[in-house]
Amino acid sequence: MKFITFSGVDGSGKSTQLNLLREKLEREGRKIAYFHAVEFSLANRVARFFKGQKSFQPGKEKASINASWFTLHTRLKFLFIDMVRFWFLRKKLRKENYDYLLSDRFFYDSIINIEYLTQKVSSLKSILNFGTKILVKWMPKADIAFYFDISPETIMSRERTPEQGIEYLRVKQALFQQKIPQWKMIVIDANREKEIISEEILSKI
């Protein structure tokens, strides 16, 4: 089973390209499993429960821009549990002979979110950074990891824009770019037409 992830800042086109690839592979008769890191996250499931949200809707969940030290510490623990859960999920899908597992966001994106929020915490930041480094070592790796590189200005010029604003996009983009070599991500220029991007992705898999 080939495991492919789609990562990038909000509004970079991850979901659109994943759906295009999913439809193409299914037309070819491939058995496809779908994974969404936000939906899978135990921390987000607990948050949705307390908010009274009965179901997960991709693209509808507002990203956090602030968090306390305790909240981030708890997120790290939940993320470790999620990684263990994912290991069992991946093993199960292999046994069921899935051809592809396609992931809309992944633990890569979760780590970036935590690093973004950690920048705003003044106390015990070093402990959080150490915890994040440990998790990165344990993190499952994708067979192919795509990173959608797009200018924040392009995202903010669209009809639907992230509520967090352009500075939020710029900071998260910079964090991603630091990790690209380490995570061996394939950079996709997402400033182009979706059909051209889709063709490039197909050529990579």
Image (cartoon, grey):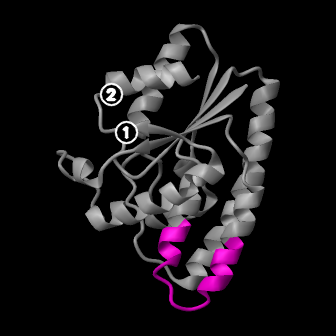
**199 falls in the magenta region:** no
Residue occupying image coordinates x 65% and y 25%: 100
The spot of residue 160 in percent (x, y) is 22, 47
Query: Mark 1 to mark 2: distance in Å?
Result: 8 Å
Q: Are marks 1 and 2 in contact (CB under 8 Å)?
A: yes
Could you say which disc has been placed on residue 119 in the image?
A: none
Q: Residue at x 35, y 62 (%)?
A: 170
- Magenta stretch holds residue 118: yes
> Mark 1 = which residue?
13
- The reply, left or right, for residue 201 in relation to residue 43 is left
Q: Label 2: how many residues lie within 10 Å, few (<14), some (14-19) or many (20+)?
A: some
Q: Position of residue 76 (x, y in %)?
A: 66, 69
Give the label on residue 194, or none.
2
Residue 28 rendering spot, x and y as whole percentages: 56, 7
- Inspect this view and state whether residue 22 appears: no
Q: Is residue 87 left or right of residue 171?
A: right
User: Farthest front residue?
Assistant: 181
Residue type at mark 2 is: Lys
Magenta segment range? 114-131
In this rendering, position of residue 158 left or right of residue 33: left
Image check: 124 left or right of 194?
right
Q: Quadrant of the C terminus?
A: top right
User: Upstream in the sequence, badge 1 or badge 2?
Assistant: 1
Main SS category, magenta section: helix
- In the image, residue 47 sits, relative to residue 28, either above or below, namely below
Within 10 Å of the Cα at label 1, are there few (<14), some (14-19), or many (20+) other Cα atoms?
many
Give the total of numbered labels.
Answer: 2
- Residue 80 location (% of width, % of height): 73, 62
